[in-house]
Amino acid sequence: MRKLIQIDSREAGAGKTTEGIYPRVRELFGRGQQILIVVPSVRLQEQYSSGLSDLRNNMVVINSGNANAVTESLIGALYRNESIIIITHQAFRQTVIPYDLKSKYHLIIDEALDPWSVEEVKASTDELVSLSKAFSISESERCNQYALLTRSGVSSSLLDGRQWKTLMSANNDLYVDIDSWNQASDVSGNRQKIYIYVQLSQSIMERWRSIWVAAAAFDKTFMHIWFDLIGYEQEFVHEFSRHKRNIHIYTHKDFTWSRDTRKRQPLVLTEFLRQVDTTRGVESILMLKNNDEVQCITNSTKLEHNAHGINEFSHHTNICLASAINPSPAYKGFLTNRLASSDIGFTWTDGDVEKFIVGAFTAYNFYQLVMRTNLRVRGSDQLVRVFVLDSRVAVAFSDYFEIDNPVRQYHFWDSSYIKPAKKAPMTGAERKRRHSAKKRLLDANKSQ
C-alpha cells in the first residue's frame, strides 16, 4: 500500500461538510497548515465560502467564472502559498500540479471523483495516422483484452482540442481494446470509431501531506475500486449508516431503461409518467429526465443531474427519476475489466459486477438527488415517494435505506408497450471480420 487515505463515508445529510470538513480546515489553518479543497460544483464553492466566512480573507476560490485561465490561476495560488484554495473537480483533473507544491498542502476532496471516463474518437485516415504517431500499445501493461497506451511526446493533433488535451494530460492513463485499436489502424478510407478509456493516474494522489475524502457510502463508488487498484490504503474514519426513513420506492417490474429503449419504445415513458402523475396526487414533484426529453409531468420541477449543493428542495416529498443513464456496452466492458482487476472485485460473480456497475454508475447519482428532498431534513417522518423507471436501479438505490421491502414493483404499463429489441447494427470491425471469414471460405472452396 502506498499511502493512507482517510474517508468520511457518513450518509448524505449527516454532517460530512459542516461537522467534518469545516472543523478540519479550521484546525489545520490554526496550526499554520495549507489546504487545497476540491468540490464538485461552483455552487458548493459558494457554500464553502459562506460556511468558512471567518477564514474568507485567507481563502482563494478559483473557477471559470472568476479566472480566465483556471489552471494558471491555481498554479499561481499554490506558488504564492495561499492558505486555503478551493477548486472544482474539473480543475483538479485538468491541472498537473508539481510534486514540490503538493508536498506543502493537505488535500480535501468533497464527494467522490469518477476515476474513469471514455473518449469516443471518430477518426479519418489522416487522424488515425496522427494517433498512431502519438500513441502506441505498451507491451508490458496488458490486462486481458485491454492495454495501456504510451505517449510519444507529439504535441499536436487533428483531433478536437478538448479531446486532445484530455488524452495528452499527465493526470490520465489511457487504455484501449487491443483488437479494436489494431483493426482501426489497419483500415483506410472511411472514418473509424475508436474508444479510448481514461483512468486517473495515481500520480494525481501522490505527495500530498494528507488526503481526506468525504463521500457518502464510499464503498459503493468507482473511486473506492480505483484506490484499491493503485494500491492506496483506505481508513474509514466514519462509516455509512443506512437511512431509517419513511420512503416508498415505485418501479416497474423487471425493466431496464436505456437510450436505445427510449428510441424504440417512447410510449413506455408516456405511460410511466401518466401513472406517476396519478399516484403522486396533487402535490408537486421533482423530475429528473434526459436533457433532450420533452415529456414531463404537470406541476413538476426539472432537476439537474449534478445534485451537489442543491438545498432548495427539502420541502418536496415526490421525486421521479426517469433519466436513462447507462454506460455503453464498450465502456461497460472496460469497467468490468477494472473491477475484476482489483483485489475487491477479483472474486465477484458476473451478477456482483453488474450490480456494482448499476449502483456506482446510476443509483449513486440518484441517491444524491433523492437526498435533496425532505429525506434530508433531520427528524422528519414525512413519507417520500420515489418513482424509478429502471427496476435494476430501484433495487440498487433501495440499499441505502434500512426498511423492510422498500421497493414496490408494479406493472406500470401493459406488456403491449414493450416492443422486441432490434438486432444492433454491426460495427466496422465486425463487418471486416465477417468479410474476412467469407473470403477465407471462398478461397478454401476454390482450392478444393
Image (spheres, grey):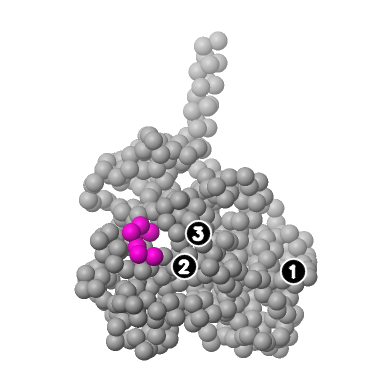
Mark 2 residue crowding within 10 angstroms, few (<14) / some (14–19) / many (20+)? many
Residue sitting at x 38%, y 59%: 205
Amino acid at dot 1: Val
Residue sitting at x 59%, y 68%: 239
Q: Nearer the viewer, residue 418 or 30?
A: 30
Would residue 176 be visible to someone looking at this image?
yes
Secondary structure at numbered mark 3: strand
Question: In the displayed structure, would residue 155 be above or below residue 316?
Answer: above
Is residue 84 within the magenta segment? no
Secondary structure at numbered mark 1: strand
Which mark is first along the chain, 3 or 1? 3
Amino acid at dot 2: Val
Residue indicated by mark 3 = 234
* Quadrant holding the C terminus: top right
Location of residue 165 in the rendering, given as x and y in whole percent from the top left corner: 30, 57
- 257 on left or right of 23: right
Q: Nearer the viewer, residue 443 or 228?
A: 228
